Image (spheres, coloured by chain):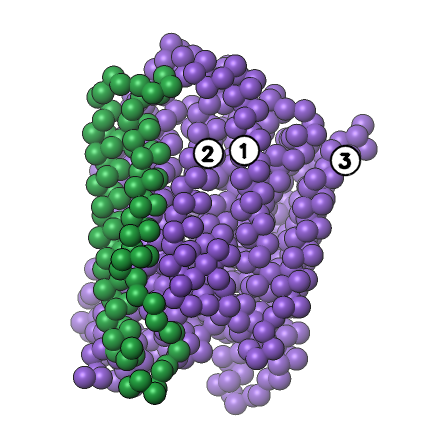
Chain colours: A green, B purple
Amino acid sequence: MKRSDKFRQANKEAKATVLATVAVIVFWTLAGFGLSGSDMKILSTPIWVWMGCVGSWIFACIVAVYLANNVCVDMSFDDEDEEE
Amino acid sequence: MELAKISNLWPLLLFLLCMMGASMWARKSASKDASFVNNYYIGGRDLGGFVLAMTTVATYSSVSTFVGGPGVAWSIGYGWLYMAIVQIVVIFLVLGVFGKKIALVSRKIDAVTIIDIIRSRYQSDTLANLSAFVIVLFFCSTMVAQFVGGAKLFEAVTGLSYSTGLTLFGVIVVFYTAIGGFKGVAVTDALCALAMFVGLGILFSSILDKAGGYEAIMNHLATNHPDMLEPLSRGKMPVSLYISQWMLVGVCTLSLPQSVVRCISSKDSQSIKRAMIVGTFVIGLMTLMATWIGVISKGVLTGPLSQYGTADNITPKTIISCMSPFWAGVTILGPVGATISTIDSLLLSASSSLIKDIYMHKCAKEGKALTDATIKKFSMGCTFILGALVFFISLNPPSLIWQINMFAFGGLETAFFWVLILGLFWHKANKTGAMWAMAGGVAIYCITLAMKIKFMNVHQILFGIVFSGILFYIGNKMGKDQDESVLKIFFPEKYED
């Protein structure tokens, strides 16, 4: 990979990470505040607690796995002059 | 009596000895190829995914993960948990946004600190010195606050004096940080993170045991404190507080220098990937457990707050009332681990600012050659002296420290947010803009915080970030672009094809 391509890729990953953060914020809002009106309970605990807290955590883990496996590209951090 | 109390401390003493051992080992395993500065301040760019994740999480989670947070959750309820969980984004955010770019740039320019990167990007010694000043000032006040929090908890749980606790883990942390450098800090941080989980696990199960099970506690809450089961907690958790927290402990933590510096130390792109996953999992689990403990401790400490003093007393009172002195002695590993894993990283970063960014830069400018042995003596000496200074201040902290500390977290975020983001992602960002953003942003943040000026009741970090951004833009218009030779290093994609 050329150095310029590595930087393009890094920019792309940074943008994807920002989008991923927005996705977590949206999920967190819907799963917590969105469900706070529901009377449903699990283990006597309101469903918004499970979804908004535990659910958001699981969602963030899925997002991190997705970013790592589908967006991030492996590259060497040193200059590889021979490839240029 | 004192002797009996000390005998319960052997798990802690063993743990602290492990810290010393781990740090010695890390020092021995230092790379022979890298220079002392590289080894000492960034561990020779050799951190793998797991350790990278653990040290980032452990640095980020502090004594307030154990004391402040759960204490408030005890009175607010699940709203506080819902708010604390916003921290799930912090690890993948910093690694995803900065991880690769900083790794690439820092190898090219042989950067060891965040300030190296800032100096090289903006070609400004004034900006670098201002950064060093902000870092040293705010890091030192944070370290004192951590020491005080840890030692107070130690005192409340063990019954031994404040100064005994402080001396016990204070001396050890300063010692192993000074000796082991970054690798030592990273490895001990990973051990501290494990200790935190041990502490949290024991505490969690002891509370459930004492209160007669999880559902018994929930039914108690539903009957006596229904507000604790609502996200807004009947007005105690306004939406503005949620927005404040998303900024202050969520998104804006992106620019905390103690986190960003970890991107310099990563070994390769695989370790960054693994750290994103492991770190997100770990920080979420830790936040959930610690804050949930605060909520369920309502089932153990059922009286009004006045009965226990301040919110900070909730965790120690819970520990004492739920477990035998022996288990309390094991549980305390958690908060002590949280305390020292934050202090060691801050101490080393502050030391790197003084030695690498100020002293070594000055010598290089004057053309004075420094041998590796001299640098070693100065670096370790500086870490040790700075640590000792913070330790002695913590024995009897003056009120000035608390005043500075109030500004520390948001002040660091404001200072570096745009300077780092625009510096690394916008080729037009220049020295004047960065100067204005850092100096003006921090000033506006501190003034509005001191005068308690708020917009829509949102924390002043909003002013800090917004005005810092505006000032960057205005300043940038007045300055001129950085040299092309600099921009070619930071933005090769704009030049190479």
Secondary structure of the residue carrying tag 2 is: helix
Decide: marks 2, 3 in contact (CB < 8 A)? no
Mark 1 vs 2, N-terminal side: 1
Q: Quadrant of residue B39?
A: bottom right
Across and down, in percent, residue B406 comes to 44, 45
Give the residue at x 22% y 84%.
B496
Mark 1 vs 3, N-terminal side: 3
Q: Chain of mark 2?
A: B
Residue on which disc 1 sits: B201
Residue on which disc 2 sits: B289
How many other residues sit within 10 Å of disc 3, few (<14), some (14-19) or many (≥20)?
some
Q: Is residue B496 above or below residue B381?
A: below
Q: Chain of mark 1?
A: B
Residue B6: assigned label: 3
Decide: marks 1, 2 in contact (CB < 8 A)? yes
Q: Amino acid type of disc 3?
A: Ile
Residues beneath discs 1 and 2 located on the same chain: yes
Q: Viewer-nearest of labels 2 and 3?
A: 2
Measured Cα–Cα span from mark 2 to mark 3: 28 Å
